Image (cartoon, helix red, strand yellow):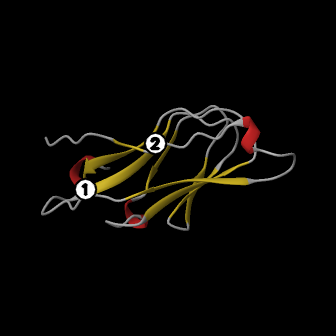
Amino acid sequence: MTTFDPIPLTINPTPEDLKNGEILYRSHAFDLDPIAEVCLRFVLHIDFAPDAITVNMNRWQVGITQIGQPFVADVTDYVTLEDNVMLLNVNQPGSFGAIWLDRVPCEEIK
């Protein structure tokens, strides 16, 4: 079995970033390394979010978080090697848990 290090994605909204009734868009831009002859899927993880946050990857909506719950989504179909942007629509102050991408061999995805 092949294992890969997770790819950390950093995004830290703070209460002073949010104003009454406004939605802020917090983003993280990243590139991915070429994967050669290996079949991989890319799975986005968010440990927890302070509110129901809309999660977008390269302008595609991949899901909405549940308050205080882990979020996991296969984003393989939405990422490329260069110029990726994860965008979160944030409308509630609070902190996020860790956010990362896992590279998972295709045969492990059921």
Q: Which quadrant would the N terminus be assigned to in this image?
A: top left
Residue 40 location (% of width, % of height): 25, 56
Query: On screen, 11 above or below 76?
Result: above
Query: On screen, 52 above or below 42?
Result: above
- Residue bearing the label numbered 1: 40
Query: On screen, 83 above or below 89?
Result: below
Q: In this image, 84 relative to 82: left or right?
A: right
Q: In this image, 38 relative to 54: left or right?
A: left
Q: Which mark is residue 65?
A: none
* Residue farthest front in this picture: 16
In front: 97, or 18?
18
Query: In the image, what residue type sits under mark 1?
Result: Leu
Residue 96 location (% of width, % of height): 59, 35
- Quick one: SS at disc 1? strand
How packed mark 2 is, by other alpha carbons closer than 10 Å (few <14, some 14-19, many 20 or more), is many
| Residues at marks 2 and 1, CA–CA distance in whole angstroms | 16 Å
In front: 106, or 97?
97
In front: 75, or 89?
89
- Precedes in sequence: disc 2 or disc 1: 1
How packed mark 1 is, by other alpha carbons closer than 10 Å (few <14, some 14-19, many 20 or more), is some
Disc tally is 2
- Quick one: SS at disc 2? strand
Q: Are marks 2 and 1 in contact (CB under 8 Å)?
A: no
Q: In this image, 1 relative to 83: left or right?
A: left
* Residue farthest right in this picture: 20
Query: In the image, what residue type sits under mark 2?
Result: His
- Residue bearing the label numbered 2: 45
Q: Residue at x 41, y 66 (%)?
A: 83
